[in-house]
Image (cartoon, rainbow, N blue to C red):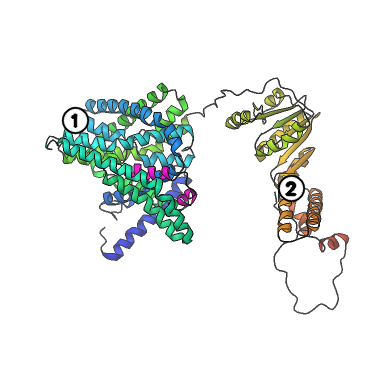
Amino acid sequence: MAVEGDAGQLIRVVALLGAAVVAVPLFRRLGLGSVLGYLAAGLAIGPFGFALFAEPEAILHFAELGVVMFLFVVGLEMRPSHLWNLRRQIFGLGALQIAACVAALTGVGLAFGFPLPVSFVGAAGFVLTSTAIVMQLLGERGDIALPRGQRMVSILLFEDLLIVPLLALVALMSPTAAAPDAGSRLGGVAVAVASLAGLIVAGLYLLNPLFRVLAAARAREVMTAAALLVVLGAALLMEMGGLSTAMGAFLAGVLLSESTFRHQLEADIEPFRGLLLGLFFMAVGMSLDLSVVADQWALIAAAVPAMMAAKGSCIYLVARVTRSSHADALDRAVLMAQGGEFAFVLYAAAAAGGIIDAGVNASLTAVVVLSMVLTPLVVLVAKRFTSAAAPSLDGVERADGLAGSVLIVGFGRFGQVMSQSLLARDVDVTIIDTDIEMIQSAAEFGFKVYYGDGTRLDVLHASGAHRARAIAVCVDDRKAASRIAALATRSFPQAKLLVRAFDREHSLQLIAAGVDYQIRETFESAVRFGEAALREIGVDPEEAAAIAAEVRRLDAERFELELAAGGDPRAGIPLLRGNAPKPTPFVTPKRESRALNDLADGATRTVDAPPATDG
């Protein structure tokens, strides 16, 4: 299908957007993830689908800006001091993984009968992981800032540093290229160093003053343009120096990570990053040459799993050698087992230099693209067939044989504040929680918190619930709170039961379950907040306090009505006062209205109360 002219260009743009809008929500709904949705959409509208695009390489080159912007955002979250702390992971872990994987992948190429130079080039291209796919999957899981995510980011950064040396090595391996003289090599290194130094100087001394001037102008669109200028300018500067554009954007982000404009920059870049990254994945899908796959199906069908298995195995072994847990090592191996977008550049350079022929180039490219396509599926399969890793309890004690006057279940924000009153009275408290990071953090502030799941009866016994005078359920989970309440009322009747309620409906359920005290987690703070708002707009403090007391009284009355109605929240509607306009009668009433009962009379004199679904 060939479409020409301006209308054809518009049709292509609409096709790109339409394919993404249809495929991505569908694949996410099926649990397959957005990356696979973009890849499938690109395959559908590419040269081997509806053939709306004949040259996906051009789109791929432009869409790599999405990867550039992604790394800029990652850099904004990574302060220079933190980056310095990662230096051993970047140069130590990264170098070890690359060396092991190149050796293994070269062996795979030799096993398939390719000469050593071809095997090495194939390995060098496949060893560099797809930054776009790994970062997208880590971002969707929220793992980028976690230690295991930071290790993967460190390895990806080292791989970006290898791009220029690998291209230079391919040029040296070429049988047709003339050997460059020492002067040209030194000149190239000097240009790269100058580009890097220029970027650092600009980031340290120019960017913050620039954004302060632009912020003073109060032109939002100019700030957005400046954010794009920083990202693209850094990428261009690195490209002129023969370095990775993604690396340049990342460094620009790091240099701005301590800027007061960091959050504004991230918000300005985010829409462009998401669109371009999606376009990149679609371009990868378009690049899959199905005719090559059909012609070389036996080779490709064997090479894809062999290359992914060899690379994944090496990544796992390196991770274990460097003392990562089995779960983290397996996760890294699965996420990073594919080839990356740089392979296309490296294979093209090797073909131009006569190291590999056009047929091998097409086959290797197909192997890389298929490995990228298969990665989201492999991640899903690995997630289904691997059990969740047990949490590490290093430095954390399990609840066992404990005793205290009050057992606090859950030590988040609510539990921490609640505990202060008890501790001020020197009450003997026992605290349990399941958040290991919180337990370790609480220890730094002088709290002894034990690891224990309060929804389990045996854990409650081990925590001393059968001896406690009171059990305070402070967990930030409605279902868990209800389950703990049910266990406690049935098994520990000697203890007073106090429960943090999620909302009004949850409070009604807890009272029906027989708890001694419940409080909605946001009710009292909301009433105090409303009282403060009245004072700030000029209402007398005494009057504001009286109104707040009236709100509490009316809320209690509503609650009693709802309890009497079997937990129906609509029973208290007459005590509410909304802000919807009241209808005006067409004829003025001849006499004033008269209340028919005390409830209606009280309703006509109420002040504003929280909505029916309040917290």
Q: Is residue 114 visible?
A: no
Please report the residue visible at 39 percent of the width from the left and 43 percent of the height from the top.
71
Percent x, y of residue 56: 28, 50
- Which residue is denoted by mark 2 in the rendering? 524
Question: How many neighbours does mark 1 have within 10 angstroms: few (below 14), some (14-19), or many (20 or more)?
Answer: some
Kind of residue indicated by mark 1: Pro
Would you say 396 lies left or right of 401 here? left
Q: What stretch is highlighted in magenta?
A: 243-266
Would you say 338 lies left or right of 407 here? left
Between residues 354 and 91, which one lies in front from this camera angle? 91
Percent x, y of residue 34: 43, 45
Percent x, y of residue 205: 40, 47
Dot 2 or dot 1, earlier in sequence: 1
Q: How many labels does the image show?
A: 2
Would you say 316 lies left or right of 178 here? right
Q: How far apart are marks 2 and 1 (CA)?
A: 72 Å
Q: In which quarter of the image is the N terminus?
A: bottom left
Name the main secondary structure of what is drawn in magenta: helix
Kind of residue indicated by mark 2: Glu
Q: Can residue 161 be seen in this view?
A: yes
Q: Residue 117 carries which label?
A: 1
Percent x, y of residue 83: 42, 36
Classify residue 337 by image quadrant. top left
Classify residue 254 by image quadrant. top left
Q: Residue 97 carries which label?
A: none
